[in-house]
Amino acid sequence: MDYHEEKQVKSGIVALIGPPNVGKSTLLNALLGQKISIVSPKPQTTRNRILGIINGDEYQVVILDTPGIHTARSPLNREMVKIALSSLADVDVIIFMIDTSFPLPEKISETTIHLQNAGKPVILIVNKADQLSREMLLPILAAYKNVFPFHAMIPISALYQDGTEILLEEILKLLPIGHRLYPQDIPTDATERFIAAEIIREKIFHLTSQEIPYSCAVIVDNFTESEKNITIHATIFVERKSQKGIIIGKQGSMLKQIGQSARLELKEILGMNVVLKLWVKIKKDWSGDELFLKELGMH
Ligand SMILES: Nc1nc2c(ncn2[C@@H]2O[C@H](COP(=O)(O)OP(=O)(O)OP(=O)(O)O)[C@@H](O)[C@H]2O)c(=O)[nH]1
Ligand SMILES: [Mg+2]
């Protein structure tokens, strides 16, 4: 069938925004049914706009996962917040996500100004509902009701995929009828190279602490597929010499752990055996280097 003769469906773009660590990336992965966006217990994990495409017989929903909105000081953090807020421009629906540790609407008052300016329907999601009883959720919903004219307010648990069906129904009510914006057989516009770099970064977030995860950036230098396996060469950039020592670890033990867990997950995601080689380089104060941030796909 010719692409233009394809039947029309509910089709549109949804931005997923909110404070750091509330579960935005977990929700994107849950809605997609596969992992595209990295997740960690630490805030400010996501640094780029991550696009996921959910297809049904009667709909196509494009979801933009974004970095958490926070008070940003360094150029890296400012760029992250800029990416999140700029995603509001060309969307049909905004999902504003908080979690049950955000019972105070005052904490989001600056963000509601952006929601107002965007002039799009906004769905409020209270995530991590698994952590609170229904009775304790009600006052949170009541408090947020006065903050912004939300189209709907839905408590969900992205982790346990509870309430995600209701959310999808609410999104579909707000989408126009039109053509699918993307082919039906791709879950994301991210390249395998980018996803590989992100998975390595996720392991750093899980295995290291304090400032280390925030001092690391990952670039895939080489991604080669043969019949037997995929060979990935990647560089972990740190800002200072002491951080290089920590990432490498005693006799290379930390780098080995990062490599092993990244390799295992990449093998699953890519559906092929993976040979992963990691290097660690110092790039002094990279987080303040606009050109390097561009290289990381942050623009
Ligand atoms: N209990 C519970 N934990 C959740 C839920 N959803 C996400 N989490 C956890 O919350 C933490 C943060 O999740 P992410 O998906 O990385 O959060 P995020 O909003 O994308 O964070 P940033 O990218 O830093 O802005 C992880 O440890 C998740 O496992 C949920 O529904 N219930
Ligand atoms: Mg995230």
Image (cartoon, helix red, strand yellow):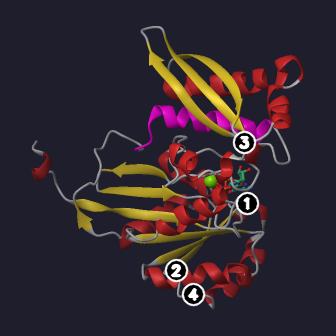
Highlighted range, magenta: 189-207
User: According to the image, label 1 marks what residue?
Assistant: 130
Q: CA distance from mark 4 to mark 1?
A: 25 Å
Labelled disc at residue 282: none
Give the Cα distance between marks 1 and 2.
27 Å
> At 62% across and 87% down in the image, what residue appears?
145
Q: Amino acid at mark 1?
A: Asp
The answer to which of 176 and 201 lies nearer the viewer is 201
Q: Which residue is mark 2?
A: 115
Where is residue 202 shown, x and y percent of the image? Answer: 68, 39
Which residue lies under the disc numbered 3?
284
Q: Quadrant of the N terminus?
A: top left
Q: Inspect the image, locate mark 4, and give the three-letter code of the amino acid beneath it.
A: Phe
Q: Residue at x 37, y 73 (%)?
A: 174
Q: Position of residue 209 (x, y in %)?
A: 84, 43
Residue at horizontal 16 percent and vertical 55 percent from the top: 7
Q: Based on the displayed image, in which of its 4 quarters is residue 292 positioned?
A: top right
Q: Which residue is mark 4?
A: 148
User: Whole-Å distance between the Cαs marked 3 and 2?
Assistant: 37 Å
Q: Is residue 250 visible?
A: yes
Q: Is mark 1 within 8 Å of ligand 1?
A: yes
Closest to the camera, between mark 1 and mark 2, is 2
Viewer-closest of 139 and 38: 38
